[in-house]
Image: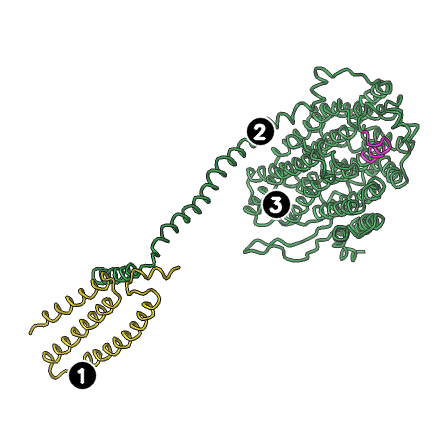
Chain colours: A yellow, B green
Amino acid sequence: MEIKWYIGLAVALFCTGIVGVLVRRNAIIIFMCIELMLNAVNLLLVAFSKMHATSAVGMADPSIVSNAQIFVFFIMVVAAAEVSVGLAIIVLLYRNTRSVDVNFLNRLKN
Amino acid sequence: MSNVFQLVWLIPVLPLLGFIINGLFRKKVSKTMAGVIGSGTVLASFIISIFVFLSVKEGNIHVAHYFDFINIASLKIGFDFQVDQLTTVFLLIITGVGFLIHVYSTAYMHDEDPKDFAKYFAYLNLFVFSMLLLVMGANYVIMFMGWEGVGLCSYLLIGFWFKNNDFNSAAKKAFVMNRIGDFGFLLAVFWLVFKIGSVDYNHVFNVVAVAKTNPLTTFDITGITLLLFVGAMGKSAQIPLYTWLPDAMAGPTPVSALIHAATMVTAGIYMIARSNILYTMAPVSQCVVAIIGLATAIFAATIALKQNDIKKVLAYSTVSQLGYMFLGLGVGAYTGAVFHVMTHAFFKALLFLGAGSVIHAMSGEQDLRNMGGLKKYMSITHITFLLACLAIAGMPPFSGFFSKDEILAAAFSKSPLLWGVGVAGAIMTAFYMFRLYAMTFLGKFRGTTEQQHHLHESPKAITIPLIILAILSVIGGWIGIPEVFMHGGHRLEEFLSPVFAQSNAITEKHVISHSTEYVLMGTSVVLALIALLYAWNRFSKYQKTAKEETGLGKVLENKWYVDELYDAIIVKPLMSVAKYLNNVFEKKGIDGFVNGVGKAVNYGSRQIRLLQSGQVGAYILMMVLGILAFFIIQLFI
């Protein structure tokens, strides 16, 4: 398949993720949107890696094909770590304000 | 004795030390200590000056280089002292008369409390230091340092009793008028540096005297000399910058004697005498100097005719005599002018100190109309004052006769008109001086009985300087006996001839015959004698009347309304410009601008504070917008 479909899908997912982060009030939904953005990026990386593998057989540096796929694993690990920390913060936030509404956070300033 | 020149730096440094000690420790020194330190340092300088004089008399002159003061590119100005004949004459006058005045001050100022007493002596010593720096400098810059210093000390000493606002205004007036003159002086120095590249006397004079090496056009020399004369106008109280001197009588009388009679005001004469070659090469400037000098001499003499304050008469007399000195310089009689400086220092200091003695005895009264008949209470003051009056009136064989006559003879050889006006001034001088004498010492006492009980002769510390100065006023002229009386009798001219040699080589000599000179002398002496006797006769019978002055007398009494004129032309416009600048420019403009910046910052910060809403969503939005903007810029620019 042509690369443009994969790019289009990844961009759509990314934009959805951004808009979700900006618009939604629930903190957990915001986290889900962040994950969405990260996954969109992963998709893009894997797609490009496959593209190079099929179009450039016999290149000087054969490891170029698998670089992006290894990078995807890094991203997934970082996402996991970040989610655990973020959820811990949300639990504490809930304990203090009894809600997960992000707009209530401005109470912290008092 | 040429090794005495190694000690030449001590001459100004000793009074400086006196200033530092009396100044820093003024709360701790007793009155006697302060007096001893103050007078002792000047006495030591005087003794060294005598040795220097003896050495210079044998023909040794000396330029001592101490350190490089300014050393930029091709401009080298060293801190140098030059000791030659002209310097020595002034050194002896300054330290000698200065010492006598210091001794006098110990008695005159004895009513002050110890720290003011010490402050007074500190200022006096600082003044002597600056004046010595002025006459000993070997270039115009060192002279200027001394020039500024004496102006400053004049301000400090006139305003010595600073609790009185009028005295402060007088001090400010003196300082500001001096400053105007200083501006002219500085411009002249800059011009010299620009054209010749040096301000050193020897360098400048040698370069200018030889036509081949002279880079200055006549325009340059005239400009420089005129600007230097502007400086002299301010410092030595010539028209139009003379009005500060009568007001300066607000200071203590010994200050008037030292600064405004014997030394500071003669700084201008020293400067022109030192630059004589420059003036000889600019006849236009010489003309200007002579005319302004003569005009001042006459103008001030007319004002003195009608003054009623003893010190004001003497002040105007000083302005008038200074005019004579400048007349002498303007007609090329440099020796005559310096001679008159010397004799004037003696008799004017004597007159001021005598006036101080009278004021002291009259418990502070200075108005002539309330004095009279003091001769039987204060005989020493009376006799010395009389001798001084005879000297200033130009009666032979007192000192004033010889010096004034030399100037008048030189004026005659330039133009009989100058001589005629000069003689008119001499007649007026004799008249007002003897009016002063007669109203003070002759006739009946016109003061209160209270004052009469207090009348007494002053203590020794006051009368001994008076006696010494009186002796000098009598015999001081005998070093300058002109050719007509005794061949080779003009010792002073012989002594000073190396200083004026370059000028004398250029000027053509107008020699007047002996018979003409006898006629001139005789005329001036006889006319002055008539004026003297008339004044003596009329004012010894003076009665106090309540009559107001009218007509010309009133104009003279009000000093030709010159102060009022300056007030209207210069002071009021300046004040209104200052008020305008203050109210509009300063308050609305600059203050408005500065306050406005503050207000703008205040407003801006209030708006920016609203960004911090505490809403996470807003923060994330801003982050995203920032990244977007970054990308767009990267891709499209």
Element type at marker 2? helix
Task: Give the residues drawn in magenta, as a range.
Answer: B352-365
Task: Please report, as a chain letter, where disc 2 is located.
Answer: B
Quadrant position of the N terminus of chain B in the picture = bottom right
Q: Is residue B117 visible?
A: yes
* Front residue of this view, candidates B392 and B526: B392
The residue most toward the front is A98
Say few, some or many: other residues with alpha carbon within 10 Å of mark 2 (under 14 / 14 to 19 / 20 or more): few
Side of B489 relative to B12 (left or right): right
Question: B391 or A72, which lies in front?
Answer: A72
The percent coordinates of residue A12 (x first, y second) are: 14, 66
- Which mark is nearer the camera, 3 or 2? 2
Q: Label 2 is placed on what type of residue?
A: Lys
| Distance from the alpha carbon under mark 2 to that under mark 1 | 93 Å
Q: For mark 2, what is the residue?
A: B572
Q: Which mark is residue B210?
A: 3
Circle 1 marks a residue in which chain? A
Residue at 71% across / 51% down in the picture? Answer: B82
Q: Are marks 3 and 2 in contact (CB under 8 Å)?
A: no
Q: Assign a secondary structure to mark 3.
A: loop
Query: Which one is in front in this view, the residue at disc 3 or the one at disc 1?
Result: 1
Q: Quadrant of residue A94?
A: bottom left
Mark sitting earlier along the chain (3/2): 3
Where is residue B579? Give x, y as percent.
54, 33
Residue at x 79%, y 40% (from the top left corner): B492
Badge 1 marks a residue whose secondary structure is: loop
Amino acid type at image mark 1:
Asp
